[in-house]
Image: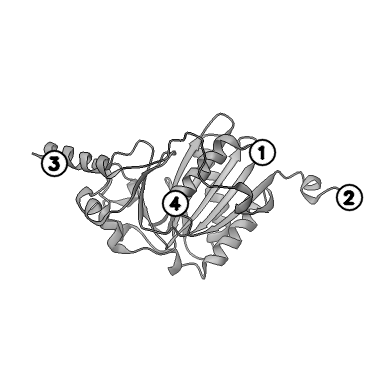
Amino acid sequence: MALPQAIKAGLPCMNLLRMTAVPILEQLYLEERLLRSSAENWCIINHGTSLPTIVMGISGRPSELVELKPVLRDQIPVIRRFSGGGTVIIDNGTLFVSLICNKNAIPGLQPYPHPIMSWTGQLYGQVLCEFGDFHLRENDYAFNSHKFGGNAQSIIKDRWIHHTSFLWDYDARNMEYLKLPSRAPKYRSARSHVEFLCRMKDYVPSRTSFIEGTIKSLGGHFSIRPFDLDELGSLSSSLSGSTKLLTRQELEEACTSQCVAVR
């Protein structure tokens, strides 16, 4: 009996889950569940999310990162995710790609933030270098000196996740909900959000070409197995995780504390 190609090639399996417009909160619930309770490798791709939403890192403070008055006025959801990294606002123009891997899945890759970031930079570089002057700049993906991809990571005992929000397109008005970060990469050079960011659609021919190129690039390291969302059941689970949708009360209290501090 012939052995499966993945076994003959000696490549680990990676489950590929493709989704469209799944709310980012549900996606994060799913990712945390798979990181902590699965023993398999996963690539999760989501085309956009249903509503504009702000997502902060696990240690993020709304008073320092978010323009709270307009966020409260316009009822913009704010999520604190389970991974580190910075703050983003995402919408239906955002592409999400998340890689969840066992620490031994990629030979020679040390399970620490910088080596993982370097590896993913090379992975996406294989896809994007033909479309523009692609760089991994500090912890961002950029064309020339303009960021289009923000990254976050979480590393646990035997596994890690690297997830990225790619700005295929964005509404410049939404960027007004975010404060300028107090800690920013040097290459930002104090530029505003709109001056600092770029849109992937201005460089890459189509979303499909980027996604298919990414899957092909992953195929050099894994045997890709398409996976159906229905096989996972409900995206949310009883697993007690760190991802949290902040309540209006929490945002109002942060806004009140901020106003008192300013006085």
Q: Residue at x 59, y 47 (%)?
A: 233
Nearest to the eye among marks 1 and 4: give it: 4
Measuring from the top left, give residue 204's x and y in whole percent.
50, 67
Task: Say which residue label 4 marks.
Answer: 24
Residue 259 circle label: 3
Measuring from the top left, give residue 124's x and y in whole percent.
54, 54
Disc nearer the start of the sequence (1/2)? 2
Disc nearer the start of the sequence (4/2)? 2
Residue 142 image-quadrant placement: bottom left
Marks 3/2: CA–CA distance = 69 Å
Q: Residue at x 73, y 45 (%)?
A: 11
Q: Residues within 10 Å of mark 2 (few under 14, many from 20)?
A: few
Please tell me which residue lies in front, 181 or 40.
40
- Label 4 SS: helix
Which amino acid type corresponds to the residue marked 3 in the rendered image? Cys
Nearest to the eye among marks 3 and 1: give it: 3
